[in-house]
Each structure stands twice: as structure tokens, then as C-alpha cells.
Amino acid sequence: MAFVHELKIRPDYFVSVLDGSKPFEVRKNDRDFRTGDYLMLSEYASGYTGRKVKVLVTYLLRDSCYVKDDYVIMGIKKV
């Protein structure tokens, strides 16, 4: 079952997700992220700006050779 994770994102990263140049998200894996989950990314700059983008988690990289312990790199796609 897919889950929607509500997350803050910095404005520079938010714009890059919006324009498609950042098709990934790096996060501490404190929410048990899974392929098929959704991320609701809310732009945050000293407070919420009101801009949001919803993305689908399409891939997860947890390999300790490439990713710090307790972190995950997620492939994402705007929906």
C-alpha cells in the first residue's frame, strides 16, 4: 500500500524538482520509504511558501557502498 510522506524542501531543490533536472531525493530513512510511495514536497524558506509538488518514488538505493547509513537515495517522478 502506497503512503504519502509530507516533507519540507529548500527552494533551490524545489525548483530543480519542478523543472525535472533533479529526478532524485536524498533523505534520512526515518520513515521506511518504499517504491510506490509518494512524497508531497512543500517548499520551505524560513516558513512554508505554499508551493508543493507531488512525486512518486520509482527507485530506492540503500547500498552502503554508495549511501550513508540510515539514508536513502530515491528516484522520483512528478505526478
Image (spheres, grey):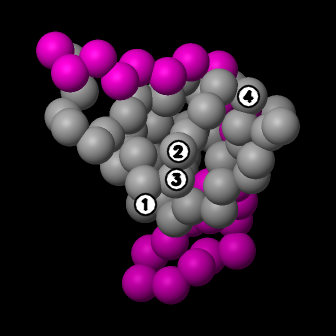
**Going 31% across and 40% down the picture, which residue do you hit?**
71
Determine whether 44 is above or below 74 in the image. Answer: below
Is residue 30 something that shows in the picture?
Answer: yes
Distance between the alpha carbons at the discs numbered 1 and 2: 22 Å
Q: Which residue is mark 3?
A: 31
The magenta segment: 40-65
- The earlier-in-sequence mark between 3 and 4 is 3
- Answer above or below: position of 47 versus 62: below
How many marks overall? 4
Marks 1 and 4, how far apart at CA = 23 Å
Which is closer to the viewer, label 2 or label 4?
A: 2
Q: Position of residue 2 (x, y in %)?
A: 80, 39
In this rendered view, identify the residue nearer to me: 72 or 43: 72
Q: Which mark is residue 53?
A: none
Q: Which mark is residue 10?
A: 1
Q: Disc 3 vs disc 2: Cβ atoms closer than 8 Å? A: yes
Tell me if 48 is positioned left or right of 13 in this view: right
Residue behind mark 2:
32
Mark nearer the N terminus (1 vs 4): 1
Q: Quadrant of the C terminus?
A: top right
> Residue 78 appears at what percent x and percent y?
73, 32
The residue identified by callout 4 is: 36
Image quarter of the N terminus: top right
Q: Cβ–Cβ below 8 Å for labels 1 and 4?
A: no
Contact check, label 3 and label 1, Cβ < 8 Å? no
The percent coordinates of residue 61 (x first, y second) are 40, 20
Disc 3 to disc 4, C-alpha distance: 14 Å
Q: Secondary structure at mark 2?
A: loop
Along the polypeptide, which appears first: circle 1 or circle 2? 1
